Image: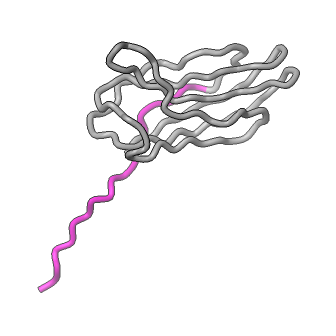
Amino acid sequence: MGQKVELTKRVSFPMFTETATARTATGNGTALTLPDDVAELFVGIDITAVSGTTPTLVVQVQQQDANDVWQTLAATSSLNATGQATLHLPAGSFVLLGGGQARIRWVIGGTTPSFTFRVGIHGR
């Protein structure tokens, strides 16, 4: 007789996509309700166009706390060129409230900056 093997590895699943749009100012993505069983997040950022003088972009993952205040859980370094960037919020590295609200926030700086980018979130 063979041994019983239990698989416990969870597969990541898509949760949210913020469409590619040209953005010239700081803003927030649409809030989403996190599934009760999400333990970690993977965020992919795809920047397809950049213009302006010394443009900068920082993408943050925020979650609403019990007082309805948006708290930043993680943020990219300052981005200033086309390409891809990622954020990984591993299990245990932050307080993630299953069933709570989360969103993407972008902070744009520089002189007449413009960034065209999209963001995708996967959970596990």
Q: Which residue is drawn at 26% across and 34% down?
A: 36
Look at the magenta stretch and give its main secondary structure: loop
Residue farthest toward the left in the current orientation of the protein: 1
Q: Quadrant of the N terminus?
A: bottom left
Span of residues in magenta: 1-19
Side (left or right) of 62 relative to 85: left
Residue farthest toward the bottom in the current orientation of the protein: 1
Does the magenta portion include 2?
A: yes
Q: Which residue is drawn at 35% across and 43% down?
A: 39
| Percent x, y of residue 86 | 60, 42
Look at the picture and state if 108 lies above or below 7.
Answer: above
| Percent x, y of residue 67 | 35, 14
Does the magenta portion include 31?
A: no
Q: Which residue is drawn at 21% across and 72% down?
A: 5
Q: Can residue 13 be seen in this view?
A: no
Q: Can residue 70 be seen in this view?
A: yes
| Percent x, y of residue 59 | 61, 29
> Which of the 4 quarters of the picture holds residue 63?
top left
> Which of the 4 quarters of the picture holds residue 19?
top right
| Percent x, y of residue 37 | 28, 40
